[in-house]
Image: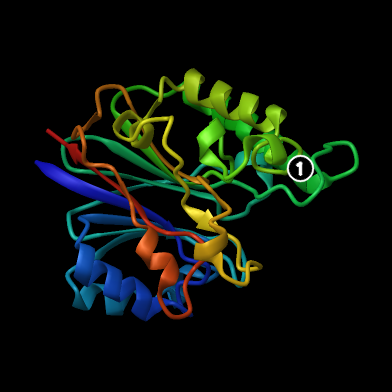
Amino acid sequence: MRATIATWNINSVRLRVELVAAFLEQEAPDVLCLQETKSPVDKIPAERFAELGYSHMAARGEKGYNGVAIISRIPLEPLGHEDFCGKGDARHVAARLPGGVALHNFYVPAGGDEANRDTNPKFAHKLDFVAEMADWGRGLDGPAIAVGDLNIAPLEHDVWSHRQMLKVVSHTPVEVEAFEAARAAGGWGDVTRADISPEEKLYSWWSYRAKDWALADRGRRLDHIWARGGAAAVPGSSRVLKPWRGVEKPSDHVPVIAAFELG
């Protein structure tokens, strides 16, 4: 079967429940992976999503912080989570899709403002988290898809200015090296960039701080879709849905979507 999978850092699922509902109605993905839900699992508005046909969910949550959820209109088999860095925070959840494909939803730490692991514990946490993703990826077996807000823009055209961003957290060389090591360790392919040329500027996040985000267009591609082990993405199906940044009370991220043949 063919299924579309979307990923979106929603920046509070309860605050933006109707925005999520509008997205589900308009874009109708089969599966939506949310990050930064900022909600305990029992407070996620699952009934609202079920009204729209999305009656399956696997989630982890915290009050006011982090949080990841997979909501789906096709059956899911929850697969639990990994506790990266042993902090107990809600940054990973997994489920098995029809056809046996494992789906992993990640929210990688942002890393704070200073790109120095010795003086910034948040940056150290980020680097350690991504290193553990590499170790975890080496042990994977079988087809899998990984999505989420990975908080790293690895390529030159994943940021508005490669030169000016080299010392800014999310695009520093040490982060990019760790990101690519984790991707290689798991045998992951970058689904979005397989469809959209690396020479094309492509962003999924624009800061709230900009007076006119669209005019400034100083974005970063922080949200990713990866696939491995025979999980077959449909060529040409990738989209980054920039218009969702321009809606009323938006998230600072936009949805990223791709289709897969699940077998």
> Picture coordinates of residue 71 (x, y %)?
31, 60
In the depicted structure, whether residue 133 falls above or below residue 78: above
Residue 54: tell me if it is visible.
Answer: no
Mark 1 surroundings within 10 Å by alpha-carbon count, few (fewer than 14), some (14 through 19), many (20 or more): many
The residue under the point 23% across, 43% down is: 97
Q: Report the residue that reaches farthest toward the left.
A: 1
Q: Quick check: 56 left or right of 118?
A: left
Q: Quick check: 159 left or right of 124?
A: left
The residue under the point 20% across, 55% down is: 30
Residue type indicated by callout 1: Phe
> Picture coordinates of residue 149 (x, y %)?
51, 49
Q: Which residue is mark 1?
A: 123
Q: Of 168 and 18, which appears nearest the observer?
A: 168
Q: Quadrant of the C terminus?
A: top left
Q: Of 216 and 15, which appears nearest the observer?
A: 216
The residue under the point 18% across, 35% down is: 234
In the depicted structure, whether residue 124 falls above or below residue 4: above
In the depicted structure, whether residue 91 falls above or below residue 85: below
Q: Quadrant of residue 23?
A: bottom left
Q: Quadrant of the N terminus?
A: top left
Q: Of 164 and 191, which appears nearest the observer?
A: 164
The residue under the point 42% across, 59% down is: 254
Rendering colour mode:
rainbow
> Picture coordinates of residue 138 (x, y %)?
49, 19
Residue 249: tell me if it is visible.
Answer: yes
Counting labels gives: 1
Q: Label 1, secondary structure: give it.
A: helix
Q: Report the residue that reaches farthest toward the front.
A: 215
Q: Quadrant of residue 79?
A: top left
> Picture coordinates of residue 99 (x, y %)?
16, 36
Q: Of 228 and 202, which appears nearest the observer?
A: 202
